[in-house]
Amino acid sequence: IYKTDTLSSGLVALSSFIISISNSMTSTYNLSNNNNIDLTTLFTDVEGITVTGNSLNVTISGLLPGTQINSNGYFTAIIIGFLSSIIFCKLMNKNWTIKLPDTVPPAIAKPFLSIIPALVSLYIIAILTFLLNRITGKILTDVIYEILQRPMLGLSQSFFVVILVAFLVQFFWFFGIHGGNVMAPIMEGVFGVALLVNLEAYQNNETIPYVWTSVSYGSFVWYATLGLLIAIFWVSKNSHYKEVAKLGIMPVLFNIGEPVMYGLPTVLNPILFIPFLLCPAVMSSVAYLVTDFKLGFSSNTKCNLGNTTGLIWILFDRI
């Protein structure tokens, strides 16, 4: 959209995220047995160290807490990355750059163009993070997690939300619009975070918290096209449908349904409109209930094998 260097913009976004999650830690050490050494005199000019009686307070700044670079920091990374990139790109388009003589080769001049926009973007993020910390007493990641990420994750586990997302994806597909791409912000931004949380819980031998993740759709819902092909082979007398089914069976086994969607076609086909929308909704509802009530046929998804991994592998690997 902004026609700027994507690498520079990405580096600014990454740097801004690191700035937003950096934190400090203070540890207190009791030095009552210090052989009568005057701690105040000894550590007067040492930055980050203060003395209170016989206690030594050591403060370390610029730490990157591990609890902020896991699933808890997902929403923060998206928001900060988006905001800092927008600021950077707008400043670049307004030519807030270092002007060099025309005699300077472009390969040398180009890196200098990003300095001012990048610094302004980083300083804005740093100031906002600092002010938020002073006002709330919390770091940015914790604030976003409590206000935005946790409520959205809770909402995503609603039975009706799971069905609605499946319905909307198919609805867009019916009109030839890639439903997965349209719903990607929800699929990856919300259900993808649930998958990361499940993976972390599994690695720590903890209870898997979320019933439904982004992988759940790929494992239990998007294979509805396979059921359509089975129905065609079983009962259909339409020669065109059978030819398309023969050509599409192998791609469908690896969750590639476009040849069938556009070959039958299911796109803009009023005869298939109702089953095309209802089948994924039914599949998602059944899979959700089976997983939620732990009936043994499926388990909470924990890792992403990829939508094109293949049906047999996914079933036996139990994701």
Image (cartoon, rainbow, N blue to C red):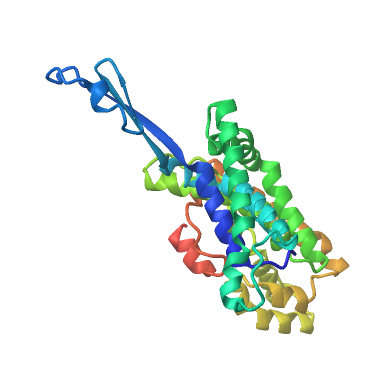
Image position of 196 (left or right of 106): left
Observer able to see residue 284 = no
Residue 173, picture quadrant: bottom right
Which residue reaches farthest top?
53
| Residue 46 rendering spot, x and y as whole percentages | 31, 32
Which residue reaches farthest left?
35
Residue 214 lies, with reference to residue 256, above or below; the image says above
Residue 98 lies, with reference to residue 299, above or below; the image says below
Q: Nearer the viewer, residue 253 or 135?
A: 135
Residue 215, picture quadrant: bottom right
Q: How many badges with numbers are in the image?
A: 0
Observer able to see residue 202 = yes
Q: Nearer the viewer, residue 313 or 120?
A: 120
| Residue 33 rendering spot, x and y as whole percentages | 14, 18
Q: Residue at x 27, y 21 (%)?
A: 40
Q: Residue at x 46, y 57 (%)?
A: 318
| Residue 147 rendering spot, x and y as whole percentages | 63, 33
Q: Quadrant of the N terminus?
A: bottom right
Residue 160 lies, with reference to residue 317, above or below; the image says above
Q: Nearer the viewer, residue 170 or 237?
A: 170
Q: Nearer the viewer, residue 65 or 218?
A: 65
| Residue 108 rendering spot, x and y as whole percentages | 56, 74
Q: Residue at x 86, y 67 (%)?
A: 271
